[in-house]
Amino acid sequence: MESNGATNTITIKGILSLLMQSIEEEDKSPKRVISLGMGDPSAYSCFRTTPVAQQAVSDALLSHDFHGYAPTVGLPQARRAIAEYLSRDLPYKLSQDDVFITSGCTQAIDVALAMLARPGANILLPRPGFPIYELCAKFRQLEVRYVDLLPDSGWEIDLDAVEALSDQNTVALVVINPGNPCGNVYGYQHLKKVAEMAKKLGILVIADEVYGHLAFGNTPFVPMGVFGSVVPVLTLGSLSKRWIVPGWRLGWFVTTDPLGSFKDPKIIERFKKYFDILGGPATFIQAAVPTILEQTDELFFKKTLNTLKNSSVICYERIKEIPCIDCAHRPEGSMAMMVKLNLELLEDISDDIDFCFKLAREESVIILPGTAVGLKNWLRITFAADQSSLEEAFNRIKCFYLRHSDQTHNILEF
């Protein structure tokens, strides 16, 4: 699991595939597989995209106007619509020239790191975090330096660590908000401090907001671009999570930078040339973007948030019934949460990876070992699932705990 090079970096999809394979190799469990490992809400019937989005894509496809290539930076109408959508929450207006269409947020991540890469450069990544950043950084020869998030402070960024780890070769700090994998939502004041620290250090901020607006706790979602006048911000996002269409692969890379740090003609030309070698999303998907962004009813978003909140509460409460796992912070957003694993209460489990593979083989429940997101002996649980599946999954996890619990500890407790 150690990451000594790009080819050795573990991916979430890779380890989930291995977990599923381990279930299939057992081939003797009558239990249906319940996966709480992948952040794909469309896998459960309680999460469906809005009819507006489906109709917009259908209309664009059937119009016969969007079967050809789109401009490499994206259709103008899609770029303009995304600029207007993001501007709703900013103290300034974006233009279509600030927006570049990508094939999902993953491609936006790769673009950001490719644009920043130079010999000897390093980048600050959150830990736990999204492993694609490390993978992309390794391919770009960017040194990775990890900033630990603080579980006892709502997974806030350790700003002292940011300052200590940064040097003249640091190019950017990555901020994921709402948080994946932690389920946290950063407040205005914390983000302001992050922006001020980045300005002090002379680095820019990459704001991963793929879960933008998926905040259902007491802390409202604040886009990092609000602080674009303090520090240059590259905002990355997509339709995937908020509209429940991850397979559509429609993302964006946006320069939320009102002071114009990215407006240098040479920088713009470099962006455009890099996009010339990329393949963006299907043209008809891009063509549907203006309708999707402008006509989706707020009730659709409220329903999604309500479902996520209820699901997160089920997980948070059921975890309390299982002594070997503990949730340090009640989820307030996104679709996942981090859970601490207490190995002292288990007599034949060596670490988080062992826990997840044995759980998969014995109970057909898939959750992600924390090692995959940078935090050993923790677990990432995705709560974007229907309530009955969550209840059944935690029933099985509880049985698994009882089967593997340290009986000596149980006797002492009794």
Image: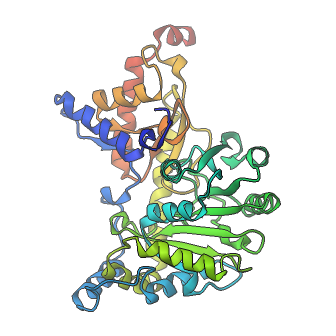
Where 127 sits versus 267, above or below?
above
What's the coloring here?
rainbow
What's the residue at 48%, 51% (across, down)?
139
Residue 315 in picture, x, y percent from top left = 47, 43
- In this rendering, does residue 83 appear at all? yes
Taking the view exactly as shown, the residue that stands out farthest to the right is 200
- Please tell me which residue lies in front, 281 or 223: 281
Looking at the rendered structure, the number of numbered marks drawn on it comes to 0
- Please tell me which residue lies in front, 293 or 130: 130
Q: Quadrant of residue 174?
A: bottom right
Locate the C terminus and report the quarter of the image it occupies. Answer: top right
Residue 270 in picture, x, y percent from top left = 55, 75
Where 337 sits versus 22, above or below?
below
Where 354 sits versus 92, above or below?
above
- Please tell me which residue lies in front, 390 or 384: 384
What's the residue at 56%, 36% (across, down)?
375
What's the residue at 37%, 25% (across, down)?
400
In the image, 200: left or right of 51? right
- In this rendering, does residue 318 appear at all? no
Taking the view exactly as shown, the residue that stands out farthest to the front is 119
